[in-house]
Amino acid sequence: MTTIADVARHAGVSVATVSHVMNHTRHVEPETAERVRAAIAALRYSPNSVARSLRRGETKTIGLLLPDNSNP
């Protein structure tokens, strides 16, 4: 499994820069951003949603409880 650190090494930038490019949180020079996007594509990186949920403390999932009305 490819990590954000692998992408950073491949692009020759820091992990923080990769994060900023992916999340659009800070200005990154266009050439650098393109290098990061190329590394993401080349390595087929996709963020791990479980790890992200643990890190952020939120799952973006809701629970729903319904009564069983099929047996009156």
Image (cartoon, helix red, strand yellow):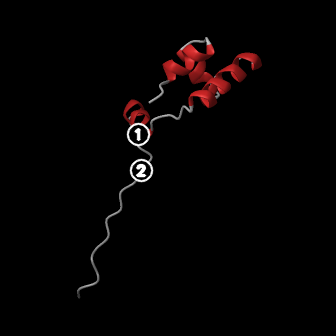
User: Which quarter of the rendering shows the C terminus?
Assistant: bottom left
Considering only vertical position in the picture, is 39 above or below 13? below
Give the residue drawn at x 35%, y 62%. Answer: 64
Residue at the far left: name it.
72
Give the residue drawn at x 56%, y 23%. Answer: 19
Residue 24 placement: quadrant: top right
Residue at the far right: name it.
30
- The reply to whether callout 1 and callout 2 are in contact (CB within 8 Å) is no
Q: Give the x, y percent position of residue 23.
A: 60, 29
In the picture of the structure, the residue carrying the numbered disc 2 is 61
Considering only vertical position in the picture, is 38 above or below 48? above
User: Which quarter of the rendering shows the N terminus?
Assistant: top left
Graded by Cα atoms within 10 Å as few (under 14), some (14 to 19) or many (20 or more), the crowding at tag 1 reads few
Residue 27 visible in this rendered orientation of the protein:
no
Graded by Cα atoms within 10 Å as few (under 14), some (14 to 19) or many (20 or more), the crowding at tag 2 reads few
Nearer the observer, 32 or 59? 32
Residue at the far bottom: name it.
72
> Of the numbered discs in the image, which one, if any, rests on residue 32?
none
Considering only vertical position in the picture, is 14 above or below 20? above
Q: Give the x, y percent position of residue 11.
A: 62, 16
Distance from disc 1 to disc 2, alpha carbons, whole Å, reads 8 Å
Nearer the observer, 60 or 42? 42
Q: Amino acid at mark 2?
A: Thr
Q: Secondary structure at mark 2?
A: loop
Residue 3 visible in this rendered orientation of the protein:
yes
In the picture of the structure, the residue carrying the numbered disc 1 is 58
Q: Amino acid at mark 1?
A: Glu
Residue 26 placement: quadrant: top right
Give the residue drawn at x 62%, y 24%. Answer: 39
Nearer the observer, 47 or 61? 47
Give the residue drawn at x 45%, y 46%. Answer: 60
